[in-house]
Image: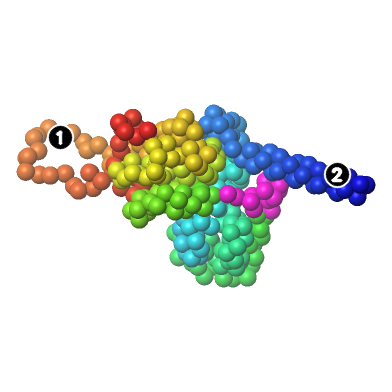
C-alpha cells in the first residue's frame, strides 16, 4: 500500500514538473511574439531615433544580404530563413543604431547553420561575408586572405555571435519556422504541385517581414495555403472551414490574410516603375509601353486581388 502511494506521488510529481517546464517554455516562446504596435512604435531602434521607414529598409537590407550570403555558402533556404528570424528577433531587443546589421546578419547565419544542423566552416562564412560587404573594392578578396585582416574580421563576427546569444539568453537556437507545418498541411490536404510551389514561395517572402514576429508558424502556414489556393483558384480540404483542423480560427485566419494582402500591395507599389514625365506633345498611339510596366508584381508575379472576394470563406 505504501509503495503504491509512493508511485502515485512520484507520478504526480513528474506530471507537475512536466507541466511546469511546458509552461516555462510557452512563456519563453511568447517573448518572441509582438503586436504590430510594439513593432512599429516601441522597437529599440525607434527609441534611438530611427523611424519606421528606415528600420524597414534596414530589415530588407539584412534579409537580402542573408539570402545572397546563404546562396554563396550553398546552405538551405530553411537555414537562411532561420537566420532572418534570428535577426528580426535580435532587433526587437537591440537597436540598429548600436549594432551593425552586416555583422549581426553574418553571425546569425553562422548560428543558424548550427541550429539547423547544417555545419558550415567559420572561415567560409568570414571570407564570403567580407567579399560581399566590400564587393566594391577589387582588393577585398585578396585582403581577407591575409592573416591580420582575416583574424580581425573573424573576431568581429564571433563577438556578434556572443551578443546574439546573450541577447536571447540562448533561445535563438530554438527557432520554429513555418516550413514544417506548411509541409504537413499540404500533405494532409493533398495540395496540387502548383499550389504547393506558390505556398512555399509565399513563406520564403513572409520570413523577410515581421509576420514571424506576430504569428506562430502554424498560423502563417495555414493562412499561406489559403492565400495560395485563392490565387490558384484551387479548392483545398474536404470541408469549407478546413483551417479549423489546424488550430486556426476563422477570425485569426482573416486577420493574417488581410496583413498578407497589405504586404503584397506595399511591395507591389515599391516594384512599380516611377511615373514618366509628362511631355508637351502627343505620343503616337502605335507606341506601346515596355513589357515590364505590366509586370510590377512582387512575390513571384502574383497579381493583386481584392481582399474581400466572394467565396473565399
Does residue 212 appear in the picture of this structure? no
Looking at the image, residue 301 sits to the left or right of residue 160; the answer is left
Does residue 199 appear in the picture of this structure? yes
Residue depicted at 6% across the width and 43% down the height: 286
Kindly indicate the quadrant of the structure image that contains residue 27.
top right
Kindly indicate the quadrant of the structure image that contains residue 29.
top right
Residue farthest right in this picture: 2
Res 308 label? none
Residue underneath mark 1:
279
Residue neighbourhood size for the residue with mark 2, other residues' Cα within 10 Å, grouped as few (<14), some (14–19), many (≥20): few
Res 9 label? 2
- Mark 2 or 1, closer to the camera: 2
In the rendered image, the vertical position of residue 281 relative to residue 301, given as above or below: above
Mostly what secondary structure, the magenta segment?
helix
Looking at the image, residue 128 sits to the left or right of residue 311; the answer is right
Residue depicted at 46% across the width and 32% down the height: 250
State the extent of the magenta-drawn residues as a range. 162-176
Amino acid at each position: 500500500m505504501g509503495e503504491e502511494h509512493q508511485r502515485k506521488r512520484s507520478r504526480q510529481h513528474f506530471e507537475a514538473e512536466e507541466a511546469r517546464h511546458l509552461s516555462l517554455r510557452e512563456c519563453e516562446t511568447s517573448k518572441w511574439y509582438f503586436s504590430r504596435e510594439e513593432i512599429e512604435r516601441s522597437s529599440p531602434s525607434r527609441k534611438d531615433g530611427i523611424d519606421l521607414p528606415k528600420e524597414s529598409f534596414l530589415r530588407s537590407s539584412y534579409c537580402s544580404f542573408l539570402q545572397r550570403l546563404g546562396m554563396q555558402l550553398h546552405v538551405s533556404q530553411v537555414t537562411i530563413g532561420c537566420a532572418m528570424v534570428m535577426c528580426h528577433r535580435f532587433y526587437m531587443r537591440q537597436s540598429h543604431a548600436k549594432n551593425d546589421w552586416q555583422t549581426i546578419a553574418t553571425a546569425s547565419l553562422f548560428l543558424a547553420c548550427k541550429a539547423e544542423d547544417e555545419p558550415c566552416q567559420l572561415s567560409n562564412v568570414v571570407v564570403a561575408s567580407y567579399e560581399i560587404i566590400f564587393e566594391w573594392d577589387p582588393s577585398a578578396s585578396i585582403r581577407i586572405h591575409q592573416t591580420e585582416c582575416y583574424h580581425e574580421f573573424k573576431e568581429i563576427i564571433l563577438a556578434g555571435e556572443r551578443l546574439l546569444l546573450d541577447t536571447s539568453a540562448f533561445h535563438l537556437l530554438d527557432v520554429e519556422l513555418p516550413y514544417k507545418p506548411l509541409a504537413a498541411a499540404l500533405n494532409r490536404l493533398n495540395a496540387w504541385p502548383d499550389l504547393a510551389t506558390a505556398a512555399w514561395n509565399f513563406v520564403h517572402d513572409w520570413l523577410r517581414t515581421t509576420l514571424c514576429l506576430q504569428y506562430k508558424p502554424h498560423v502563417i502556414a495555414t493562412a499561406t495555403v489559403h492565400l495560395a489556393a485563392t490565387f490558384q483558384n484551387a479548392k483545398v480540404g474536404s470541408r469549407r472551414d478546413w483551417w479549423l483542423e489546424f488550430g486556426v480560427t476563422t477570425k485569426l485566419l482573416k486577420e493574417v490574410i488581410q496583413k498578407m494582402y497589405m504586404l503584397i500591395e506595399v511591395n507591389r507599389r515599391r516594384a512599380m516603375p516611377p511615373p514618366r514625365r509628362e511631355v508637351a506633345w502627343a505620343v503616337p498611339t502605335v507606341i506601346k509601353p515596355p513589357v515590364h510596366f505590366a509586370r510590377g508584381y512582387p512575390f513571384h508575379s502574383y497579381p493583386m486581388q481584392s481582399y474581400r472576394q466572394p467565396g473565399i470563406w
